[in-house]
Image (spheres, rainbow, N blue to C red):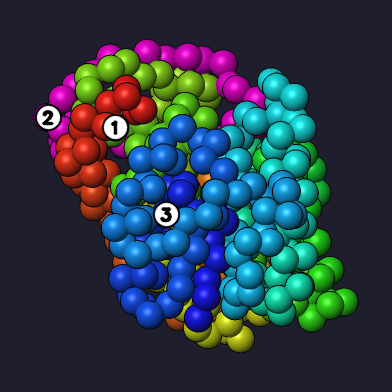
Amino acid sequence: MKLLVTGGAGFVGSSLCIWLKKAYPKYNIVAFDNLKRRGSEVNLLDLKNHGVEFVHGDIRNPEDFDSIGAFDVLIDASAEPSILGGIKTNPSYIINNNFNGTINCINACLEFNAKIIYLSTSRVYPIDVINNTQFDEDDTRFTYSENQVENGISELGVSEETSLIGCRSFYGTTKYASEMFIQEYEKFYGIGSIITRFGVIAGPRQMGKTDQGVATLWMAKHFWKQQLQYIGFGGFGKQVRDIIHIDDVCELIDLQIHKPDLFRGKVFNVGGGMKNSASLLEMTSICEEITGNKISIKPHVDNRPADVRMYVSDNSKINNEINWQPKRKTESTFEDIFTWIKDNETKLSQILR
């Protein structure tokens, strides 16, 4: 098989390329990336050492696909993932990359009769819907209350039945629009497609920043003893996310590549689930235990635009229908990030510090 991974030098893309090449040495794995995101250049040597072909190109330019030739499956991991993208800056880039770029990916699949595996996001669910959940508060985190007013949300988290009506950020809207267009192409052109709405993906190779990659950001700041902030919702650090290890994501995509009929025509929420969720306070404790370092974390009371109090993926649907659930625990995800930073301290210090 020939697999094309867009965003192939990024966190998810490079991890997936290397994972697939190890699992299937005879496959032709092509990483396609414009190298715009800082840190992506660090992954190029690893891609080369593992026998992954790299093509420097931009999904916004349809002609950049011409040098690749025919392929069997395109895995789209190329989104600009900033939640704040387009809110405080011109939204043109995030729209061109996340939406128009996806259209170019779909058309490339159409040309070569290839399948597309689309990595969507939990951010397709509207901000107000997520923040209107009924919650309780304990010493270290917010939790979902037993009785909810929003359909699709329960003590297990957010399911696929949750309303999609409302504003969700430019990032979330471009991803949701892409989902809809993929479904149109499937209906009218017969393109094989798989759509998965991932929660927070974390692990080695992620270049964490303040608006994305929270697990790496938290570990890096503890590793180099730098300051952090608890931003929003009172500044107490009780907001919660579920965390899924990148290796769990790779194993799921492997299944999607080789058994696509299990997934076609369905959309699944996929994340760490309630068992692998953590508040910022709890992430702090985990990072302190692993690094042995304590740092200053200041409260910042005001919310940022598009912030949500808590999001946990309800994995019930994919667990019931596909018999899939994540294997890695939150603590081991942070341990793997720590080991990666420690082993690559010199080159990563210029990016993560």
Instruction: Work out whether mark 3 precedes mark 2 in sequence or the reverse, and give the earlier one.
Output: 3
Q: If the image is split into quadrants, where does the C terminus sit?
A: top left
- The residue identified by callout 3 is 14
Instruction: Work out whether mark 3 precedes mark 1 in sequence or the reverse, and give the earlier one.
Output: 3
Secondary structure at badge 1 equals helix
In space, the residues marked 3 and 1 are separated at their CA atoms by 16 Å
In space, the residues marked 3 and 2 are separated at their CA atoms by 30 Å
- Residue at the extreme right: 188
Q: Is residue 304 magenta?
A: yes
Structural crowding at the residue carrying mark 2, measured as other residues with C-alpha within 10 Å and reported as few (<14), some (14–19) or many (≥20): few
The answer to whether residue 136 shows anywhere in this view is: no
Q: Residue at x 36, y 40 (%)?
A: 42
Query: Which of the two discs, 3 and 2, sits closer to the camera?
Result: 3
Badge number at residue 292: 2
Structural crowding at the residue carrying mark 3, measured as other residues with C-alpha within 10 Å and reported as few (<14), some (14–19) or many (≥20): many
Q: Amino acid at mark 3?
A: Ser
- The residue identified by callout 1 is 348
- Which x, y percent locates residue 139? 34, 32
Q: Is residue 223 magenta?
A: no
- Which x, y percent locates residue 200? 47, 48
Instruction: Work out whether mark 2 precedes mark 1 in sequence or the reverse, and give the earlier one.
Output: 2
Q: Which residues are magenta?
A: 282-309
Q: Amino acid at mark 1?
A: Leu
- Which x, y percent locates residue 158? 58, 55
Nearer-the-camera pick, 44 or 275: 44
- Which x, y percent locates residue 1? 50, 81
- Quadrant in the picture for residue 340: top left
